[in-house]
Amino acid sequence: MFKDYKINHLIVPNNKENYYNYYTIEKGDTLYAIGRKYNIHPELLASINGIEMENYIYPGQELLIPKSGYSYYITKDGDTLDTVSKVFQISKEEVLRRNGTIYLNEGQILVNPSSGK
């Protein structure tokens, strides 16, 4: 499902506090359990945090947890503003306004309010 997102370096929005909460991993946590707790697919959780499902997570490590009410897209090689605007079903201008600086490099996380925020 999210296996296309094996990216070495993610570009997270500068205003990430608007779109993410932080979670500090505790002993015994797994990506699956954290995903269930926050209603996010564990592979997407791993992708957003730049880790692979097979990676070890350890107590004290911080993860970005996407806030509800937003759609997230991780850019791939060859993406354009047209591509992203079609995914989000909004204008290119709105994509730029909602995300600030966009590089369109592989691995940039772009955000769109799902509920018309």
Image (tube, helix red, strand yellow):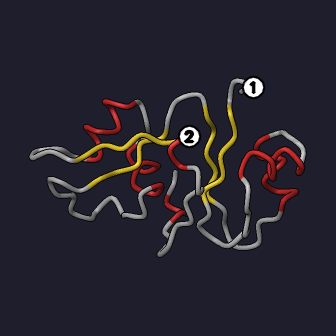
Q: Residue at x 82, y 64 (%)?
A: 80
Secondary structure at badge 2 equals helix
| Quadrant in the rendering for residue 55 | bottom left
Q: Nearer the viewer, residue 76 or 65?
A: 65
Element type at mark 1: loop
Residue 72: give x, y in percent of width and height: 61, 45
Q: Residues within 10 Å of mark 1 (few under 14, many from 20)?
A: few
Q: Amino acid at mark 2?
A: Asn
Determine crowd level at label 2: few under 14, some 14-19, many 20+ residues with C-alpha closer than 10 A. Answer: few
Q: Is residue 41 left or right of residue 35?
A: right
Q: Residue at x 58, y 50 (%)?
A: 15
Judge from the rendering whether residue 59 lies leftward or rightward of residue 3; answer left or right: left
When asked about the image quadrant of residue 82, the answer is: bottom right
The residue where tag 1 is placed is 116
Question: Which label lies toward us, 1 or 2?
Answer: 2
Dots 1, 2 in contact, CB < 8 A: no
Outermost top residue: 115
* Direction left: furthest residue: 27
Q: Is residue 91 above or below residue 46?
A: above
Quadrant assignment for the C terminus: top right
Q: Which residue is mark 2?
A: 18
Q: Nearer the viewer, residue 3 or 64?
A: 64
Placement of 114 over or under 98, stated as above or below: above
Residue at image point 68% right, 30% down? 114
